[in-house]
Amino acid sequence: MFNHSFNKQASMAYKPMQMQKVREMLQRLIATPQDYVKHVQAFSGSVIMSITYGYNATPENDPFVSTAMRLAELVVNVVTVERAVLLSTFPILSCIPSWLPGGRYKQWAGESRSLTRKILDEPFSHVKHNMTTGSASKSLVNDLLSTGIGKDTSFDHEEVVKEVAASALLGEFESILQIFSTVLMFILAMTLYPEVQIKAQEEIDRVVGQDRLPDFSDRENLPYIEGVFMETLRWKPVVPLGIPYVTRSDDIYNGMYIPKGSIVLTNTWAMTQDEGYYPDPATFTPERHLNADRKIAKDFLDPVFGSGRRICPGRYVAEQSVGPW
């Protein structure tokens, strides 16, 4: 079900919506540039809500987006590696009352459960209502309900779709954070390296002109812009230690024994700051991703979205959301 709506081919259908939301955000940035953090955050959440539920979020204080972003904040606070290690090493700590120091995570967990229930029910009901009136937009939920994918099980199909959609949304929190943080890192880079901004603007003016904004069809003709995008991901990876995972069985890797239940982290920061691959890694240099012909080098190391079976399922959506910048 996930692959049906988030694979590379399926993600292309979301490009018009993503481009529209980018342009709406640019208008808000022009109107109130001092609120850039709020605008970028609203954009990030609205893209995911649109893809999952076909929901067109309002620019400010949208109830669904606010719920999703609050839940994302709680997940980041509650589900931490250090807390998992402490609780697994000293299980008695789980008995600490929520009102004692160190027990606040229980309050957060309770709020998380309440918000998760809202995320399960309310957006799904919104899609069902729109499907009844014939006004439903393309979305994960609409596609799954319309096509009947996953119906050949003993479980209630609507409940399955509801939980898959909520899982997709919660799973896409990584993508929300990637989009939000990457755009902010891009703004920081352009502030610290104005010469890069000048070169990027010159390429856009030369290829696209000054009568319209760039779109996805221009991307292959903007290698320097692509280099800026790649360098933004590399320069300050927004999830420097990746997403923690737990081993399901004992394993041996390069002679090292990894017992079952170990927390495994991918040190994305070490990979993207490796001087063997990237000389002077602390400097923002888009040219490092271009070959002698000013084309994108094919040997680009890209661990930002994870790897293997646990690679971020929303990576294509996240990349497309940042790409139009």
Image: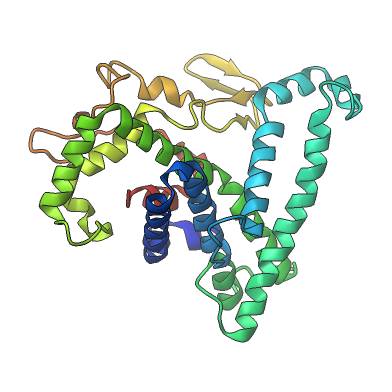
Query: In the image shown, does 218 or 10 lie closer to the viewer?
Result: 218
Left or right of 92 on screen, residue 22: left
Say how many tags the image has.
Answer: 0
* Residue 258 percent location from the top left of the image: 60, 20
Task: Report the residue at 48% width, 49% height from top.
Answer: 39
Is residue 313 visible in the rendered structure shown here? no
User: Viewer-proximal residue, 105 or 43?
Assistant: 43
Would residue 185 appear left or right of 65 to someone viewing this image? left
- Seen in the picture, residue 36 relative to 139 is either above or below; the reply is above
Residue 1 appears in which quarter of the rendering?
bottom right
| Residue 299 place in picture, x, y as percent | 24, 33
- 45 or 93: which is nearer to us? 45
165 left or right of 324 in image? right
Q: Position of residue 284 (x, y in %)?
A: 28, 26
| Protein image colouring | rainbow
Residue drawn at x 42%, y 19% as measured from the top left: 270
Q: x, y percentage for residue 48?
A: 53, 56
Of all residues, the one furthest to the bottom in this rendering is 133
Instruction: Please indicate, yes or no, whether residue 185 appears anywhere in the rendered image.
Output: yes
Q: Is residue 283 above or below residue 106?
A: above
Q: Residue at x 30, y 19 (%)?
A: 281
Q: Residue at x 65, y 39 (%)?
A: 73
Q: Eyeballing the image, is 214 above or below 276?
A: below
